[in-house]
Image (cartoon, rainbow, N blue to C red):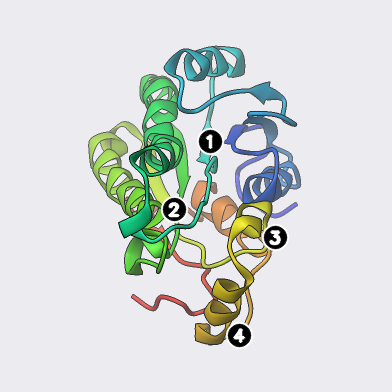
Amino acid sequence: MSDTGLAGRRVLVVGGGSGIGAAVAEAFRSEDSQVLTADLTGADLQVDVTDESSVAAMAGAAGPVDVLVNSAGILTQSPLIRMSLAQWQQTIDVDLTGVFLVCRHVVPGMVERGWGRVVNIASQLGLKGGVDLTHYSAAKAGVIGLTKALALEVASAGVLVNAIAPGPIETPLVEGITEEWKVAKRAELPLGRFGVPAEVAPTAVLLASDPGGNLYVGQTLGPNSGDVMP
């Protein structure tokens, strides 16, 4: 365990049942934090992030939260010209509105207590876009914008809000993407490979840590295999 100031902190990882979220939860456990995961299935708490009543129930069951990680998401693939409104809306509902709803129900308690950390999992595609992924790119760009705006609203109350924009990561999320897309994407990356969840999780720990994360406000950090170089 390193000196991160996270021992005993209550951490809620939404989308913590698999992939990046599960790795983030494990990373915080290694810091001796008190970790709760929330997901549709396979987590400590069940939640549908598109349903406000479900989010409210999750927040109530979680109790006071020091560190919130928003990692719930879906990823589907379609050219915009063939994309249905339903497919577009589902992605926006889960990947963007879900972040809003969870923050809306968890962040007020942080403000009241005068301390908190929020880490939103975005994507490098929110910065550069991606072929056949306009809905996902738009949702993740929205997460980055939400992160910046919320950071401005609550930093003076001791609550720091930041984002992580990973590159392609080997998770169940990308299983539905075509192999052709993945081969082409790997060829674009300076590292020549996708990352794995354990390579993203330490960034969440950094952003939540004290003093290590104390000067990050509205930032988007990019463990992305070199796909985006701001």
**Measured from the top left, where is residue 218 in percent x and y?**
32, 51
The mark nearer the N terminus, 4 or 1, is 1
Rendered view: 54 above or below 154: above
**Label 1 Cα crowd, 10 Å radius (few <14 / some 14-19 / many 20+):** many
Q: Which mark is residue 122?
A: 2
Q: Closer to the camera: disc 4 or disc 3?
A: 4
Left or right of 78 in this view: 203: right
**Label 2 Cα crowd, 10 Å radius (few <14 / some 14-19 / many 20+):** many
Q: CA distance from mark 4 to mark 1?
A: 33 Å
Q: Disc 1 designates what residue? A: 67
**Measured from the top left, where is residue 176 in percent x and y?**
62, 56
Q: For the view shown, which residue lies furthest in the front direction?
A: 82
**Measured from the top left, where is residue 209 in percent x and y?**
54, 48
Which secondary structure lies at badge 4? loop
The mark nearer the N terminus, 3 or 1, is 1
- Front residue of 21 and 91: 91
Rendered view: 230 above or below 43: below
One can see residue 103 in this view: yes
Q: Which mark is residue 192?
A: 4
Q: Disc 3 designates what residue? A: 198
Q: Residue at x 61, y 64 (%)?
A: 169
Q: Residue at x 52, y 43 (%)?
A: 73
Q: CA distance from mark 4 to mark 3?
A: 18 Å
The mark nearer the N terminus, 4 or 2, is 2
Which secondary structure lies at badge 1? strand
Residue type at tag 4: Gly
Which secondary structure lies at badge 2? loop
Residue type at tag 3: Ala
